Image: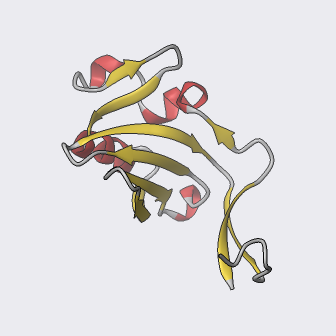
Amino acid sequence: MIAVLAWTGAAIFFAAAAQPRILETPEEVPEIQIVGQLPVYCGPHASIAAILRGAGGQMKVSDGATINGTRLELYRGQAPANQGLWTVVMSWPDGGACILATGDSWANRTVPPTPENSH
């Protein structure tokens, strides 16, 4: 069986919607920068990971390499009260990282293989 990432309801919140959960103000961690029109948080990977550990006890549970050397990382809340929290981070070989999306109500789903999803 193939595990499929599933989002239930309106569980996808980009960094703009989840800003207070991640970081009260950018001044708390000066190396974090808001990039572009949406407040996407970028900064040193170690700082991003530390913020996530402190925000709901999120730990990296999965990651994968892209063809250009970046990595997509999935962080999930580990404490019983925070098991639905999740965050997707993109990191670069130079040590930088950005929070791409965060939310709650994460659920693992198992889907039987079909010709469409068994590549």
Q: Is residue 34 above or below residue 114?
A: above
Quarter occupied by the N terminus: bottom right
How many marks on residues? 0
Q: Position of residue 93 (x, y in %)?
A: 22, 48
35 or 16, which lies in front? 35
Kindly identify the residue that appears in the image at 38 percent across and 37 percent down.
98
Kindly identify the residue that appears in the image at 53 percent across and 31 percent down.
15
Is residue 15 left or right of 45 when viewed as pictured? right
Kindly identify the residue that appears in the image at 67 percent across and 42 percent down.
12
Is residue 53 left or right of 21 when viewed as pictured? left
Name the residue at the left extreme.
Answer: 94
Q: Is residue 113 above or below residue 42?
A: below
Q: Which color scheme is applied?
A: secondary structure
Q: Position of residue 62 (x, y in %)?
A: 44, 66
Is residue 20 left or right of 30 when viewed as pictured? right
Quarter occupied by the C terminus: bottom right
21 or 111, which lies in front? 111
Q: Position of residue 72 (x, y in %)?
A: 43, 53
Q: Position of residue 5 (x, y in %)?
A: 65, 62
Kindly identify the residue that appears in the image at 56 percent across and 24 percent down.
16
69 or 11, which lies in front? 69
Name the residue at the top extreme.
Answer: 37
> Which quadrant holds residue 112?
bottom right
